[in-house]
C-alpha cells in the first residue's frame, strides 16, 4: 500500500511539473486524514451530523490515511449522517473558514466502505449556500464491504450553492440486519474539467444586493465619498448604465480606496457569507474599470490588485506592481499575472487598491474575470492533464 501511495504521489508531481505553469488544477483532494502537518491523529473536524437519538458513533484517525467511524448505536445499525465541520473548508487549509467553492466542477468522489457482510445504502449530500440548504448528490448508492470509490454528481447544485458548500457528507441508511458497523473513509476528492474563464464579478443588473454583488470598502475608507469609516458598503452604489457596474467617488489628495469582493454572492453584512473562492485554476485576473474626472481633467490613475487568502493573509499580485488607468471615462481592461501567489484555493477577498491621486474621480468597475490564457487553454494541454490526474485516481483506487 505504501509503495502505491508513493507512486500515486509521484504521478501527481509529474503531472504538476508538466502542467502547473500552464494549467493549475482546481479539481483536488479535499480530505486524506494523513496527518500532514499535525503531531497527533486528527479527524480533520469531521462530525456526526445528524441521526436519531438512539444512534451514535465515535470517529478516529488512529490509522493514518483513514477516518474510522465506529457505530455505537443502541438501536444497532440505525441511520445517521457524518460530514466535515461547518467551519472547515478543506483539510489543507486549517486557517480558512467559510464555504468550499466547487464552481465549474462535476463531481465528488468518496473512497469509503465498511466491515459488514453486505451492501448498505448511503445518501451522499452537501449543505450549501448561506442557508446551509441540504442537497442530495444523486440517488442513494449501495456501498459494499471493503473500501471502494463512489462518484456523485454536483449537477443538482445551483451556482450559489456550488460556490459556497458549508459541509459535505454521507447519510448512512438503516442497516439493522447487519448491526453496528465500522466505516472507513480514506479520501474525498472533487473532480471534473475546470473552467478556463470565470467571471467572478459582473455587477450586472439582477446580480446580488441590487448589483453591489458583495463589494465592500476594505481599507483607506476615507477616500470613498459617503463611507462611514467601516468595512462595509456605504459609499458604494450600482450604476445600471450599460451592462451595470459598481460606482463610487474616490476623493483626491490622499491614498485611493481599496475595494474588495468575495465569491460573487451577497456580502449580507459580513464577509463570512461570501468566502472562500477557489481561484487556483487561473493564471491571470482581468479588471474592466473606468475613471472619470467630473471637472474634465485627464491624466492617469495607478492601481494594484491584491488578495486576502487563508484567513486574510494579504498578498499583492505581481508584488504590488501597478497599472495605469487613463482618466478618460472609458472602460479599460487591466491585467495582472497570478504567478507566485499561494493559497489561491482559499481566497477570502479579491481586491483593487487605488493609488493616491490629486483630483476627485468617479470610479466604475464593470468586470473581474479570471482566465487561463493561451496557449494554456489549448485542448491538448487540458486533455493531457485530465489524463494525468485520471491516472492518479486509478492508482489510488488500487490501494
Image (spheres, rainbow, N blue to C red):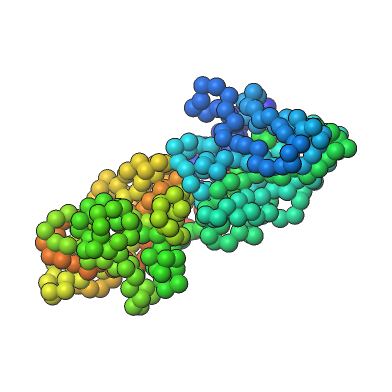
Question: x and y percent of residue 297 in the render?
Answer: 12, 72
Question: x and y percent of residue 377 in the render?
Answer: 47, 58
Seen in the image, is 307 located left or right of residue 380? left
The quadrant holding residue 236 is: bottom left
282 lies above or below 397? below
Q: Is residue 123 visible?
A: yes
What number of labels is visible?
A: 0
Question: x and y percent of residue 151 in the render?
Answer: 69, 48
308 lies above or below 197? above
Q: Is residue 110 visible?
A: no
146 lies above or below 261? above
* Figure quadrant of the N terminus: top right
Q: Residue at 62%, 50% (x, y): give it.
A: 126
The quadrant holding residue 211 is: bottom left
> 374 and 338: which one is in front?
338
Q: Residue furthest front?
A: 53
Q: Residue furthest top?
A: 39
Q: Residue at 52%, 40% (x, y): give it.
A: 88
Seen in the image, is 137 located left or right of residue 363? right
Q: Residue at 72%, 42% (x, y): give it.
A: 51
Q: Residue furthest right?
A: 177
* Figure quadrant of the C terminus: top right
Question: x and y percent of residue 94 in the render?
Answer: 48, 36
Seen in the image, is 338 located left or right of residue 387? left
Amino acid at each position: 500500500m505504501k509503495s502505491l501511495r508513493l507512486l500515486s504521489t509521484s504521478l501527481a508531481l509529474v503531472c504538476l511539473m508538466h502542467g502547473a505553469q500552464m494549467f493549475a488544477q482546481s479539481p483536488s483532494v479535499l480530505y486524506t486524514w494523513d496527518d500532514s502537518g499535525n503531531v497527533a491523529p486528527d479527524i480533520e473536524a469531521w462530525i456526526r451530523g445528524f441521526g436519531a437519538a438512539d444512534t451514535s458513533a465515535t470517529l478516529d484517525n488512529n490509522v493514518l490515511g483513514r477516518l474510522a467511524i465506529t457505530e455505537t448505536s443502541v438501536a444497532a445499525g440505525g441511520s445517521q449522517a457524518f460530514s466535515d465541520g461547518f467551519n472547515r473548508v478543506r483539510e489543507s487549509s486549517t486557517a480558512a473558514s467559510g464555504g468550499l467553492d466547487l464552481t465549474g466542477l462535476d463531481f465528488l468522489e468518496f473512497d469509503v466502505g465498511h466491515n459488514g457482510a453486505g451492501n448498505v445504502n448511503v445518501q451522499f449530500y452537501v449543505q450549501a449556500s448561506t442557508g446551509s440548504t441540504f442537497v442530495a448528490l444523486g440517488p442513494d448508492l449501495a456501498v459494499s464491504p471493503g473500501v471502494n470509490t463512489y462518484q456523485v454528481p454536483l449537477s443538482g447544485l445551483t451556482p450559489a450553492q456550488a460556490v459556497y458548500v458549508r459541509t459535505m457528507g454521507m447519510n448512512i441508511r438503516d442497516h439493522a440486519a447487519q448491526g453496528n458497523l465500522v466505516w472507513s473513509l480514506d479520501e474525498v476528492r472533487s473532480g471534473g474539467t475546470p473552467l478556463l474563464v470565470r467571471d467572478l464579478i459582473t455587477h450586472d443588473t439582477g446580480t446580488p444586493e441590487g448589483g453591489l454583488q458583495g463589494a465592500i470598502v476594505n481599507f483607506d475608507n476615507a477616500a470613498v465619498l459617503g463611507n462611514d469609516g467601516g468595512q462595509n458598503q456605504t459609499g458604494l452604489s450600482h450604476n445600471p448604465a450599460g451592462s451595470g457596474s459598481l460606482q463610487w467617488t474616490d476623493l483626491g489628495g490622499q491614498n485611493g480606496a481599496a475595494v474588495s469582493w468575495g465569491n460573487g454572492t451577497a456580502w449580507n453584512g459580513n464577509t463570512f457569507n461570501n468566502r472562500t473562492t477557489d481561484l487556483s485554476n487561473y493564471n491571470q485576473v482581468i479588471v474592466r474599470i473606468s475613471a472619470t474626472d467630473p471637472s474634465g481633467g485627464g491624466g492617469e490613475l495607478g492601481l494594484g490588485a491584491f488578495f486576502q487568502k487563508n484567513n486574510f493573509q494579504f498578498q499583492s499580485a505581481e508584488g504590488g506592481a501597478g497599472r495605469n488607468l487613463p482618466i478618460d471615462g472609458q472602460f479599460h481592461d487591466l491585467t495582472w499575472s497570478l504567478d507566485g501567489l499561494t493559497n489561491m484555493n482559499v481566497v477570502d477577498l479579491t481586491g483593487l487598491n487605488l493609488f493616491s491621486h490629486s483630483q476627485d474621480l468617479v470610479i466604475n468597475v464593470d468586470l473581474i474575470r479570471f482566465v487561463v490564457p493561451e496557449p494554456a487553454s489549448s485542448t491538448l494541454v487540458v486533455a493531457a492533464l485530465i489524463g494525468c490526474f485520471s491516472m492518479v485516481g486509478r492508482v489510488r483506487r488500487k490501494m
